Image (spheres, rainbow, N blue to C red):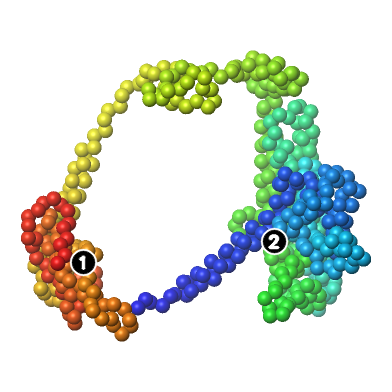
């Protein structure tokens, strides 16, 4: 009987199922981004913008088609069938939903045009909004909302004073202050992240000329310095206000939830299988406050965002100095042929195709393909009219390909001496053979009195090896009748197995009611209805193979 499963084993299946459900949900959400990389992505963008321009409105294909033609653009030329195919694909990816709107039509043709109606899904609206933001402002330098940091400091200080005062703060006042505080902080943190991402993109360039470098130098030394100084000045004050407020945050959130539950009052509908996930407003969860505190304080030992801001500024200064050194070396003629490369690029842009090939040959030495006359294999006949492109490939030796010569270079290395390894392997094989021979002698001496002796691990292993060979090759004899369960019974004839190299032979007999107990240092083995007899082999064959004879 197997032991009962442990708690970890019982929980393995639910955990695996939960992981699979999480992966399926992640794939479903990522499928909603498919239309942004599809070949018809400009048409999909125009369709999604039509739906994003409405609120709680469901549109049929003719309505979408009319709006697309009115707006113009890549999707204006779509016909009804192509537009319907695009809409169905957006439904499949999860960007649109089929509407359950009741169709009111005055004719059959009007019903056929309007029966398939679509509306925007929440995930589709979020993705399209982010995509439009990336297309509009991805490369722009976003200003840092530095004035918001002062508002965050003042809001935290006033909130801490009100919460710690007798009677605490009024729930409605606390709700307004918390919402305002986190809107200001989120906007400030986003602007910091966007600005430093843009700054890193600019400083990674190594083609800045002197005018560009001068502009970015002033930007870094003036603007970035003002940001870091303001953050360094206000961060300790914000940390002190958060330390004062922190013990009161759980109670404050409880009072705010009791005053205004928002969407948290949504409960599972029907039998409880339909659950509604709610995304709370910023500042209504303890995790939001932990993120705010971690921005200014080092909580987990990984450094705060203020520390990362300081390190990013230092890296930006290092990149600025690297560009300065590059331009100094370029001015002295030590490196950088930027002007020459720009002139060459202009020649390529203005040249005809054949002239561009001649320029490439002159500038880079890129001549046409040169074929080497290496004969193919002797059993391979290649007609003279076979093209180089479709003909068989001939293996070119590395020496010939790299140096143009078949001669070997360098001295031939001496053959490695493996005598020590061979001697070690022979010793190990000799020790294994001696251990097996000793195990065979132990089994022969213990034959007939297995219940009285305790076998070593090697002897028990050899016995089990012989027993498995004998039972695996034994023949079973069918009895005449069947047992009570309806299954046919079999008798086991005598089975033999022997190892001529060790001179040992095992005979297995089936005897009803017999009990053979094997004691060893690894445990006891009970064999029911079997009798074992160990003796010497009948022949002195020395071919080293295990022979099995079955009577």
Q: Nearer the viewer, residue 333 or 353?
A: 353
Camera sees residue 143: no
Horizontal side of 131 relative to 505 (left or right) equals right
Tell me how far mark 1 sits from mark 2, CA to CA.
72 Å
Secondary element at image label 2: helix
Secondary element at image label 1: loop
Q: Quadrant of residue 112?
A: bottom right
Q: Earlier in the sequence, mark 1 or mark 2?
A: 2
Camera sees residue 420: yes
- Is 532 located above or below residue 338 in the figure? below
Residue 463 in the image, given as x and y percentages of width and height = 18, 65
Residue furthest to the bottom in view is: 484
User: Quarter holding the N terminus?
Assistant: bottom left
- Residue tagged 1: 474
Q: Badge 1, how many Cα within 10 Å: few under 14, some, many 20+?
A: many
Residue 238 in the image, given as x and y percentages of width and height = 75, 59
The numbered dot on residue 126 is none
- Is 419 located above or below residue 413 in the figure? below
- Residue tagged 2: 291
Q: Quadrant of residue 494?
A: bottom left
Query: Residue, x 84% and y 56% (percent of image)?
Result: 61
User: Quarter holding the C terminus?
Assistant: bottom left
Query: Residue, x 47% and y 27% (percent of image)?
Result: 393
Query: Residue, x 15% and y 76% (percent of image)?
Result: 451
Q: Quadrant of residue 520?
A: bottom left
Q: Nearer the viewer, residue 460 or 471?
A: 471
Horizontal side of 254 relative to 21 (left or right) equals right
Q: CB under 8 Å between callouts 1 and 2?
A: no
Horizontal side of 120 relative to 482 (left or right) equals right
Residue 432 in the image, given as x and y percentages of width and height = 18, 54
């Amino acid at each position: 009987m197997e032991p009962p499963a442990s708690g970890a084993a019982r929980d393995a299946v639910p955990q695996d199922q939960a992981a699979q459900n999480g992966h399926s949900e992640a794939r479903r959400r990522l499928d909603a981004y498919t239309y942004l990389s599809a070949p018809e992505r400009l048409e999909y963008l125009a369709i999604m913008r039509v739906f994003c321009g409405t609120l709680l409105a469901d549109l049929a294909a003719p309505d979408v088609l009319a709006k697309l033609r009115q707006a113009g653009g890549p999707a204006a030329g779509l016909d009804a069938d192509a537009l319907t195919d695009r809409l169905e694909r957006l439904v499949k990816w999860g960007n649109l939903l089929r509407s359950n709107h009741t169709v009111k039509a005055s004719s059959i043709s009007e019903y056929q045009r309007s029966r398939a109606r679509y509306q925007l899904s929440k995930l589709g609206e979020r993705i399209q909004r982010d995509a439009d933001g990336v297309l509009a402002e991805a490369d722009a330098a976003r200003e840092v909302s530095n004035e918001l940091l002062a508002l965050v400091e003042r809001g935290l200080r006033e909130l801490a004073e009100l919460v710690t005062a007798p009677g605490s703060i009024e729930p409605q006042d606390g709700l307004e202050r918390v919402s305002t505080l986190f809107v200001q902080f989120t906007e400030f943190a986003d602007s910091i992240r966007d600005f430093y991402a843009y700054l890193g993109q600019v400083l990674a360039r190594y083609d800045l000329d002197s005018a560009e470098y001068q502009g970015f130098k002033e930007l870094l030394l003036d603007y970035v310095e003002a940001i870091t100084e303001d953050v360094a000045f206000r961060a300790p004050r914000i940390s002190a206000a958060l330390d004062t407020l922190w013990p009161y945050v759980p109670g404050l959130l409880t009072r705010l939830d009791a005053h205004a539950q928002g969407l948290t009052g949504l409960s599972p509908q029907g039998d409880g299988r339909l659950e509604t996930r709610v995304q709370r407003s910023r500042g209504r969860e303890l995790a939001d406050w932990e993120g705010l505190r971690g921005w200014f304080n080092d909580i987990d030992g990984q450094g705060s965002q203020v520390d990362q801001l300081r390190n990013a500024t230092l890296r930006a200064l290092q990149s600025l100095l690297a560009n300065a050194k590059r331009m100094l070396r370029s001015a002295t003629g030590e490196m950088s042929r930027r002007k020459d490369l720009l002139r060459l690029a202009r020649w390529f842009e203005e040249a005809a195709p054949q002239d561009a090939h001649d320029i490439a040959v002159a500038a880079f030495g890129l001549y046409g393909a040169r074929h080497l006359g290496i004969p193919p294999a002797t059993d391979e006949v290649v007609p003279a009219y076979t093209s180089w492109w479709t003909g068989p490939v001939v293996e070119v030796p590395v020496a010939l390909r790299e140096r143009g010569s078949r001669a070997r270079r360098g001295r031939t290395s001496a053959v490695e001496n493996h005598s020590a390894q061979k001697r070690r392997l022979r010793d190990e094989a000799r020790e294994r053979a001696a251990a097996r021979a000793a195990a065979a002698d132990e089994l022969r001496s213990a034959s007939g009195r297995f219940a009285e002796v305790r076998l070593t691990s090697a002897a028990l292993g050899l016995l089990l090896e012989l027993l498995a060979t004998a039972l695996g090759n034994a023949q079973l004899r069918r009895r005449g009748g069947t047992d009570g369960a309806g299954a046919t019974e079999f008798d086991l004839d005598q089975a033999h197995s022997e190892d001529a190299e060790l001179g040992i032979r095992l005979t297995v007999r089936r005897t009803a009611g017999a009990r053979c107990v094997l004691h060893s240092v690894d445990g006891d083995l009970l064999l029911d209805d079997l009798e074992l007899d160990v003796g010497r082999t009948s022949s002195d064959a020395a071919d080293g193979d295990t022979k099995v004879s079955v009577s």
